[in-house]
Amino acid sequence: MGACVTLAGVTRDFPEGFLWGASTAAHQVEGNNDNSDWWDWELVDGGAHVHEPSGVAIDQWHRYRDDMALLGGLGHNAHRLSVEWSRLEPEPGRFDDEAFDHYADVLDTVLANGMTPFVTTYHFTLPRWFAARGGWLADDAVERYATFVAEVARRLGAERLPFVCTVNEPQIIPLEGYLLGVFPPGHEDFDEFQAANRALASAHRAAVAALRSVSSDIRTGTCLQLIALEPARPDDEGDRELAAMMRREMSEMHLDDLRAGGDVGDWVGVQYYSRTRLDSSRQPPIAPPPEGVETTLMGWEVFPEGLRRALDDAATVGLPLYITENGIATADDTQRVRYLDSHLRIVADAIRDGIDVRGYMYWSAFDNFEWARGYPPTFGMVAIDRDDDLTRRVLPSAAAYRRVIETGRVDALTAPAG
């Protein structure tokens, strides 16, 4: 694949057949996911751990047909979503037929609207029973997860599962849940962080094997959050050592596992938002963004250069790459267009330089429940009016994105409409 392909006198930054879409996750959009560890986490201690509970989210459990028609109408030819483990296996070994029928219809709806599904089988939320047994630290956690993934493949079928992401951000789950304590189970233990991190790397391999056992037609991958990790004070030895250690845990360990050989899947998902500057004198050891830089509603620095680093690192695995999350929380949709412009130019340059990037999915299709931050961080190209029956409002950035999809050109983002 290559960028700047000239067809009939028109120069494209992205080739024909490139997959374009946006991403969501079940707990963040469906609503009333009340059998999961996250539902419990939102309510414990009077909701002390979250800005607000998820509640009905954006009610996509009921509104998915209209939502998928909307995205297809915006020109998307791919859509990434997750199936909710706690709905599909509400008790150990008991699978819910109605929930499987629901997701079968969701995926049929995605396909009917001209979009290729990318289905994540684990996106942060666990069944309550799995969490109660020790979550990812339980001795048989990986085996139980692989059993679930095989059941998903058998029941939903390869025709609905052309692409499967086995684990969403396997490094972030241990970081937030076992080291920083801001996601369930709320622990702050470095040994548990490392153990969970390695368990999730193993869970990916086990899930690949489980999917292969059902069908060779399912293309599998893991979706890695590849943060640009840097020492806040490059001349400080403690900051340098901390940054090197966190790069080993958060990036290199997972990439090394994929490079190690065996069947590690068919593609790698790259997820990137910002850089994190580590300061060993702080607790937690995270420095604020440098003074004067552009930031988002999450407080993250806008740092597009880090996306190129992420793509360069992921490319060393030797598998095709799909950008499965990249986006901005902002109340200013013109900032979202600027963010898209700067980051898509990075992607186009990477393709031009020979990196095999085959798709881009913006985070997120819709404003949604942003975990502990609740609903204030608005990532969506489609806004949700929470004061008006969750009405969907298509933003100008969605039309700008559609122009890129139609032309394969980054400069179409800022071209006059019409």
Image (spheres, rainbow, N blue to C red):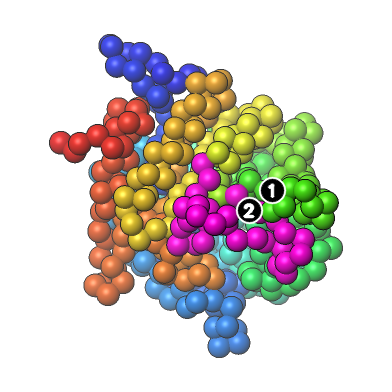
Magenta-colored stretch includes residue 195: no
Q: Can residue 200 be seen in this view?
A: no
**Residue 7, relative to residue 254: is it above or below?**
above
Magenta range: 275-304
Whether the residues at callouts 2 and 1 have beta carbons within 8 Å, the answer is: yes
Tell me if mark 2 has few (under 14), some (14-19) or many (20+) residues whose alpha carbon lies within 10 angstroms of its own. many
Q: Mark 2 points at which residue?
A: 276
The residue type indicated by label 2 comes to Thr
Residue 7 on image: x %, y %: 32, 13
Q: Can residue 389 be seen in this view?
A: yes
The circle drawn on residue 230 is 1
Q: Residue furthest left?
A: 418
Q: In this view, does 30 lie to the left or right of 65?
A: right
Query: Along the line of sight, which residue is nearer the eye, 405 or 110?
Result: 405
Q: Residue sitting at 28 percent across and 11 percent down?
A: 8
State the SS at label 1: strand
Q: In this view, does 155 lie to the left or right of 333?
A: right
Query: Along the line of sight, which residue is nearer the eye, 213 or 258?
Result: 258
**Residue 321, relative to residue 125: is it above or below?**
above
Query: Along the line of sight, which residue is nearer the eye, 244 or 19?
Result: 244
The circle drawn on residue 70 is none
State the SS at label 2: strand
Residue 65 on image: x %, y %: 30, 55
Majority SS type along the magenta span:
loop
Q: Residue sitting at 30 percent across and 46 percent down?
A: 398
The residue type indicated by label 1 comes to Glu
Location of the C terminus by quadrant is top left
Magenta-colored stretch includes residue 303: yes
Q: Residue sitting at 51 percent across and 61 percent down?
A: 299
Query: Along the line of sight, which residue is nearer the eye, 338 or 66?
Result: 338
Quadrant for residue 131, please give it. bottom right
